[in-house]
């Protein structure tokens, strides 16, 4: 695409970089912006990337809670009843709902990254569409999961 | 070592340290976790609101216990790598970074070992562990 010969040399069209975005620096050269949140123009691919990292970190809490679940089971029926009482409370359900949303977003985001890592879907249009699809799809799966949980009577407030 | 000979493969520079290995491991764990996550969602759905006995019955199936153990191990592996990337990005002092990464690694190993121990116990139908839990 670019006909530049030296690494770092400005593309011949000095108003856009390889991503097609205008990033003329104060010194007149075209450079990609470093990802400081204060100066980075909001974009859905950026939001999806941040969301993937945030949800991944949040799921560490989920791993600990799964471990607590195993502990409660191993300690017998009384301990398990205490665990289910806590987790079945409104706050407990809210935490698990949040973790479900995080899991589904991270899952959809992970699939999106696997698609990108196979060098597909990297044009701006497709990358944007994939980002939106992973965000909307992730939330829809999580909400659908909980609608089914309540509808089937497995969980009740 | 024959590092000099391996610096370039087909004209492409090879990672000098362990970047390529980490990249591959992250993708490998992601790929493994795709089906396991779907199975985990399904299992979470069936086990939600189920009583103690029903959950123990679920654990008696070697397929369930085995898949849960694999899911736990791969998830913790994936989690350790993901947290490492975050720490690498934001913690700049080498001493603090090494300390935090060490703690994360230790935490994941402990969680993995104890988790598999508990899953095996539950799969074998062992008697409840002694001492109350929160009582």
Image (cartoon, rainbow, N blue to C red):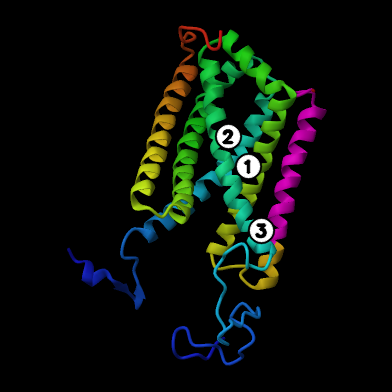
Occupied quadrant, residue A151: top right
Q: Earlier in the sequence, mark 1 or mark 3?
A: 3
Judging from the image, mark 2 belongs to the subunit labelled A
For this orientation, the residue located farthest to the right is: A151
Q: Which mark is residue A47?
A: 3
Report if the CB atoms under discs 2 and 1 are less than 8 Å apart: yes
Q: Earlier in the sequence, mark 2 or mark 1?
A: 2
In this rendered view, identify the residue nearer to me: A31 or A48.
A31
For the N terminus of chain B, the quadrant is: bottom left
* Helix, strand or loop for the magenta stretch, by majority: helix
**Disc 2 versus disc 1: nearer the observer:** 2
Q: Secondary structure at mark 1?
A: helix
Q: Earlier in the sequence, mark 3 or mark 2?
A: 3
Occupied quadrant, residue B59: top right
In the image, residue A74 lies at what x, y percent?
51, 15
Residue A149 in magenta stretch? yes
**Magenta-highlighted residues:** A130-156
In the image, is residue A52 above or below residue B50?
A: below
Residue B106 in magenta stretch? no
Position of A51 compared to B67: left or right? right
Position of B130 compared to B47: left or right? left
Judging from the image, mark 3 belongs to the subunit labelled A
In the image, is residue B39 above or below residue A112?
A: above
Q: Secondary structure at mark 2?
A: helix
Question: How would you rate the neighbour count of disc 1 (Cα within 10 Å): few for under 14, some for 14-19, many for 20 or more?
Answer: many
Residue to which mark 1 is pinned: A103
Q: Which mark is residue A62?
A: 2
Position of A115 compared to B82: left or right? right
In this rendered view, identify the residue nearer to me: B12 or B93.
B93
Asked whether residue B131 appears in the rendered view, the answer is yes
């Amino acid at each position: 695409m670019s006909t530049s010969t030296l690494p770092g040399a400005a593309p011949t069209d000095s108003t856009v970089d390889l991503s097609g975005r205008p990033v003329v620096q104060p010194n007149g050269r075209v450079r990609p912006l470093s990802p400081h949140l204060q100066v980075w123009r909001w974009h859905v691919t950026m939001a999806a990337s941040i969301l993937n990292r945030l949800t991944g970190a949040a799921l560490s809490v989920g791993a600990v809670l799964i471990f607590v679940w195993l502990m409660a089971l191993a300690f017998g029926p009384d301990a398990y009843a205490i665990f289910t009482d806590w987790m079945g409370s409104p706050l407990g359900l809210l935490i698990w709902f949040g973790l479900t949303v995080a899991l589904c977003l991270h899952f959809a985001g992970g699939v999106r990254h696997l698609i990108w890592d196979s060098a597909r879907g990297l044009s701006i249009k497709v990358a944007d569409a994939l980002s939106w699809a992973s965000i909307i799809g992730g939330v829809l799966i999580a909400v659908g999961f909980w609608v089914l949980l309540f509808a089937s009577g497995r969980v009740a407030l | 070592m024959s590092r000099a000979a391996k610096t370039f493969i087909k004209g492409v520079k090879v990672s000098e340290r362990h970047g390529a290995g980490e990249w591959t491991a992250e993708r490998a764990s992601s790929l493994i976790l795709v089906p396991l996550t779907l199975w985990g969602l399904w299992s979470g759905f069936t086990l939600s609101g189920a009583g103690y006995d029903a959950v123990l019955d679920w654990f008696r199936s070697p397929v369930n216990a085995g898949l849960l153990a694999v899911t736990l191990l791969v998830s913790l592996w994936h989690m350790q790598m993901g947290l490492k990337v975050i720490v690498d990005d934001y913690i700049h002092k080498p001493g603090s970074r090494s300390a935090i990464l060490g703690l994360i690694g230790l935490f994941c190993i402990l969680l993995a070992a104890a988790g598999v121990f508990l899953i095996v116990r539950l799969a074998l139908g062992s008697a409840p562990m002694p001492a109350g839990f929160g009582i």
